[in-house]
Amino acid sequence: MLLLACSSLTWGDNIKHAAEPGIESVAFSSTPDGTPVELYTLRNNQGAQARIMTYGGIVVSLKVPDRDGGMADVVLGYDSLWGYVDNNPYFGAIIGRYGNRIANGRFTLNRQTYRLATNNGENHLHGGVKGFNKVVWTAKEVERENGPALQLSYLSPDGEEGYPGKLRATVVYALTHENELRIDYAATTDEPTVVNLTQHSYFNLAGAGQGDILRHELMLDADRFTPVDEGLIPTGELRDVKGTPMDFTELTPIGARIEQQDQQLRFGLGYDHNWVLNNSSADLALAARVFEPGSGRIMEVFTTEPGIQFYSGNFLDGSITGKRGKVYRHRYGFCLEAQHFPDSPNQAKFPSTVLNPGEKYAQTTITGSPRNSGSCGPDRAAVPKGRRAH
């Protein structure tokens, strides 16, 4: 157990609950090395609320209405900073420099082999031992016409976790008046490098801690996925989902096929795979839809990315006590991580994740949770056309 230089406040304490939409902050806590951590609260004009802290850029709560207008927090997390520092399976965090796995913790770029920190057996996962989920970001409130927004910035030094180049990353969270959480990512580098940023919230649309997610119904706009080996490294194949438990081309309960005898489900202990999205244009497009029958909440994910990782909370085992004393048991949350494909730096046939000096990495992902089981469309304003532009 790490000893933290923290106050005894929890997320709900010492925060004014303003009736009006907007953004406010509180000096919340500090990391073990004494770095201050701030907590920002974003509210829209529909009563929805997102709380984001500067440690890891973590979404610590997201309150959205159900079909009757009742509010609930739909993301898993902890009551204070302690859990996120000490025992965090990436709840709500910004992931970088590279989301997902890189085989054997190494890749070759321009004939130079780079060795990365290994933190998932022999592989590199989610940016390494101290990825973007474990750094304190610099925050700034920004103006958006359609709801409050928070810009987070981080300068990753050359060689951090083994990556080449100094990387300047910015992430803007915006809570729109259509009950969408919009995330705009950008990055530049001074040396050739690889980049794959994503966000790792665990969702339960019935409410965080309110049972498993097996009755949630999922649709993925993907006819193919990237099968993996026992270490969850892609084999390089793009396999059709038709006739397999990976087929979510129509709304299907997550638990409908999760216990089938299938090699891929055995390797992932459930779903923990990348789906190849049908949209290949790099424009914003629907990637996923999730419906929770009890509350009527529906969540739609729109993204500019070529892939999405669906994770069914297989490693949640009841050992974590989260917000409001809720115990997070097996499959009490799911993740939908918009991304480039895992291990792309070592897979020549996958879309490239190389970023060169003078180029800009850009991606947008929008997660919408409307009031009822109807569909919602995203705010498409100012969405970047391409993932990397000169």
Image: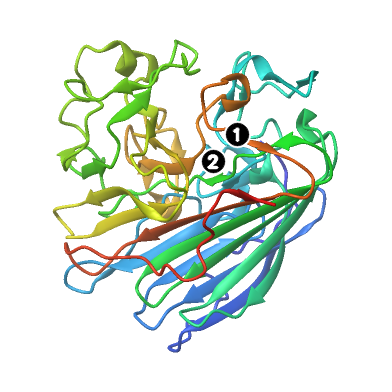
Q: Which mark is residue 90?
A: 2
Q: Amino acid at mark 1?
A: His
Q: Position of residue 86 (x, y in %)?
A: 63, 39
For this view, does 378 lie left or right of residue 192? left
Q: CA distance from mark 1 to mark 2?
A: 9 Å
Q: Tell me which label, 1 or 2, sits earlier in the chain.
A: 2
Q: Is residue 16 visible?
A: no
Q: Quadrant of residue 181?
A: bottom left
For this view, does 334 lie left or right of residue 289? right
Q: Is residue 200 above or below residue 154?
A: above
Q: Quadrant of residue 162?
A: top right
Q: Position of residue 197 (x, y in %)?
A: 59, 44
Q: Position of residue 268 (x, y in %)?
A: 38, 20
Q: Which mark is residue 16?
A: none
Seen from the viewer's position, the closer of residues 51 and 122 is 122
Closer to viewer: mark 1 or mark 2: 1
Q: Is residue 350 visible?
A: yes
